[in-house]
Amino acid sequence: MDSPVKAHRARTAAAAPDGGYAWFILLSCFLVFGLTFGVIKAFGVFYVAIHQYFETTATGTSWITSIAVATVHVVAPVASALSARYSHRSVVIMGGLICSIGVILGAFARNLIELYLTVGFLNGFGYALTWTPTVTMLGLYFEKRRPVANALASAGECILTFVLTPLFQLLIDSYSWRGALLILGGLQLNLCVCGMLLRPLKATRDVTCDKAEEEDLCLELLPKDDSKESKPTHLEAEELGISEASDQGMVKACHEEVPKSTIKVQDSNNRIKRAGHRTKILRYVDYTLITNGRFMVYSMFGLFAALGFFAPALFLVPYARSKGIEEYQAAALMSISAVLDLFGRVFFGWVANLRLVQTVQQLAATVILLATVLLLCPLASTFSELAAFSAAYGLVFGATVAVHITVLAEVVGVHRLGSALGFFMLIRSSGGLLGPPIAGGVLHRQDE
C-alpha cells in the first residue's frame, strides 16, 4: 500500500491538466514574458535618448536596466514566498501596479539617480512579483507538455521585443523619451490583467518540498507515540497493587520514573514545535535547496550566463549606432534577433519535448554555441554583418532560453519549482547586475 506522501504526489501529478484552462495560463505567461523581459530587451532604444539628454556615459545609462535585472533576481524568493502565503493571482496584480507606477514616475525623473530608483529598482521589483509566480503556475498546469509550454510562453519575450523596439523608437521621436515612458507605464497595467487569469488549481495545493510533507506526517504520529510511552508508569503502579506500608522502596522507584518520563514528553513536545516551525517556513521558502548539490551547480550556470544574457540586447543598438548605422536600421537589428529568437524557442522547445536527448545535454550544446557567437560579435562592423550576428545570436539564445526552466524543474522537481526559481534568480542576480555595466565599459572604451 502506498504511503500518504506517495499518494499525495500522485494527486499532484494528476492535477496538471495539460490543456483546457491551462492554455489561458500559457497566454498569461506569454504576455508576462513580453511585458517584463521583452521590455528590458527593447529598452536599449531609450539608451541613446537618455544618454544624450543627461550627457552621461554608456556605463551610467546601462545601470538603469542593470538595477532592474538585479532587482528581478534578488526579489524573486520574496515573490515565491508571497505567492505561497497569499496567492499567485494577488501577487502578480500587485506587481503589475508597481511596474506601472515605477515607469510613470521615471518619466518625471530629473537625473539618473531618480531613473535608477524608478525605472530601475521599482520597476524591477514589480517584474519579480509578476514573472516568478506566473512561471511557477505554468509549471503546475503543464507536465507532459511542459517543454513546449515553457518555450511558447517565453516566445512572448521575442514577439513583444520585435513589436516594441520600433514602437519605442517611434514614440521617442514623436513624444520624447519622457512621453514614451508614460505610454509604457500605461501599457504595463496589462500585467494586472495577466494576474487575473491565474486561477489556482482546485485539485491540489502548492507543495514546496517533500520534507515538509513527511514532517507533517511525523507531527501527527509523534505526540501519540510519546503520550503512550508516558502513561505505562502510572498504569503499572496501579496494577502492581503495592501498598504504602508493604513496599516503600518500589513506590519511590515509581515516583522517580515519573519525572523522567515527564521530561521526555517535554523534550518531545519541544522537538515537535521546532519541526512545526520548520515545516511552516518550508511551505513558503524551501531553504533546503541550498544543500542540493545539483541545484547549486545549475545555479552557478545561471550566474555566469546572466553576465552575457542581457548585455547584447541592451547594447546592440548603441553599438550599431557607433559604427555609423542609421537609427532605424539599428533598431531593425533587434527585430531580426527577435524573429530568430522566436523561431529558436519554439523549434528547440518542440525538439526538447521529443526527448531525443536529455534536456540538460541539449542546454549544454546551445550554451557552447551561444558563447561562440558572442565571441564573433566584435568582428561585425557593417549592417549586413551585424544582421548576420543578430540572426545567429537570436536563434541560439532562443534555443537556450527554451529549455533552461524545464531543466530546473527536472533538477529539483515541479513541487519545489516555486522556491527553486526564487533562489535560482537570487544566485544569478550578481551576473545580471554586473553584465550590462561591464559591456557598457567595453563599448565606451571602443568609442574612445
Image: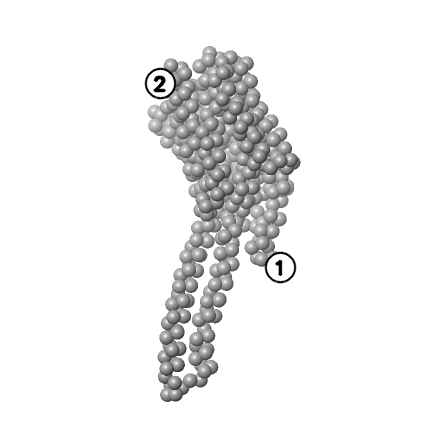
Q: Is residue 55 left or right of residue 31?
A: left
Q: Position of residue 401 (x, y in %)?
A: 54, 32
Is residue 189 or residue 259 the one in the foreground?
259
Callout 2 amino acid: Glu
Mark 2: which secondary structure?
loop
Q: What is the spatial separation of the Cα atoms under label 2 and label 1, in whole angstroms?
A: 72 Å
- Can residue 28 be spotted in the picture? no
Q: Position of residue 446 (x, y in %)?
A: 41, 16
Q: Is residue 357 left or right of residue 433?
A: right
- Can residue 291 be spotted in the picture? yes
Is residue 187 or residue 219 the one in the foreground?
219
Q: Position of residue 207 (x, y in %)?
A: 52, 49
Residue at image coords 41%, 57%: 274
The residue mark sitting in front, 2 or 1, is 1
Callout 1 amino acid: Met
Circle number at residue 272: none
CB under 8 Å between callouts 2 and 1? no
* Residue corresponding to mark 2: 55
Residue at image coords 55%, 45%: 413
Residue at image coords 43%, 38%: 426
Quadrant of res 319: top left
Residue at image coords 59%, 28%: 344
Is residue 341 or residue 222 the one in the foreground?
222
* Residue corresponding to mark 1: 1
Image quadrant for the N terminus? bottom right
